[in-house]
Image (spheres, helix red, strand yellow):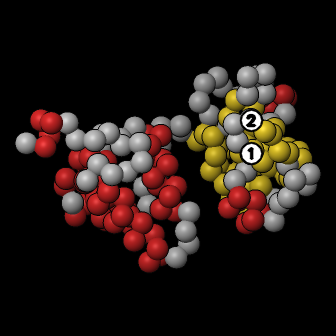
Amino acid sequence: MEEKSFRFTAPLEVIRGTLKSTVIFVPEAILEKLPKGRIRTEGTMNGTPFALAIQYKKDRSRYLVVGSILRRAAKLKEGDRVQVIFRLTDPNKLVIPEELEAVLAQDAEAAEIWNTFTQGYQRSLVYYITSVKNIDSRIKRAFEIVEKSKMRALSGQKAKTKKEKE
């Protein structure tokens, strides 16, 4: 079965709220063809690959957040017209980088802790690892995450309960 892809061209815009974000709004004509609920995508922006979730605003519009790493890679600045081509992906699928996979395979305690994290938290940790290109830096970050998780020192991680400390 062939996967359906969507394409559109829209400007890179800045929205301000709690934080300033650069975004590309998804046209209404495409939104009407998308399923309800969480939507994760993979595709390209001006030929640069991305994997992003479609976000929601209170006014019911939807957009893709274009972070600084993607903006630099695609050579985009505010106001640029961007050609977006994407397809839907399984929102529950998480690709674990081989550096982290290897570290977790060697450390049962770390793997057990990893499995207690929500998928969203896992996704943010995976992004932290994969946001650098240098393989040595990726390995270093994988070890860093594993060690911090065992000490319950990751940002947002719950501290050990009294029972776990015993």
The image shows a total of numbered marks equal to 2
Residue 78 rendering spot, x and y as whole percentages:
87, 53
Residue 97 rendering spot, x and y as whole percentages:
44, 61
The residues bearing labels 1 and 2 have C-alpha atoms spaced at a distance of: 8 Å
159 in relation to 67, above or below: above
Residue 159 rendering spot, x and y as whole percentages:
28, 41
58 in relation to 103, above or below: above
Is residue 79 left or right of 54 when viewed as pictured?
right
Secondary structure at numbered mark 2: loop
Q: Are marks 1 and 2 in contact (CB under 8 Å)?
A: yes
Where does label 2 land, which residue?
17
Can you tell which quarter of the image residue 139 is in?
bottom left
Secondary structure at numbered mark 1: strand
Where does label 1 land, which residue?
21
132 in relation to 148, above or below: below
Is residue 11 left or right of 107 when viewed as pictured?
right
Quadrant containing the N terminus is top right
Residue drawn at 52 percent across, 76 percent down: 134
Asked whether residue 16 is in view, the answer is: yes
Residue drawn at 36 percent across, 43 percent down: 157
Is residue 17 left or right of 140 when viewed as pictured?
right
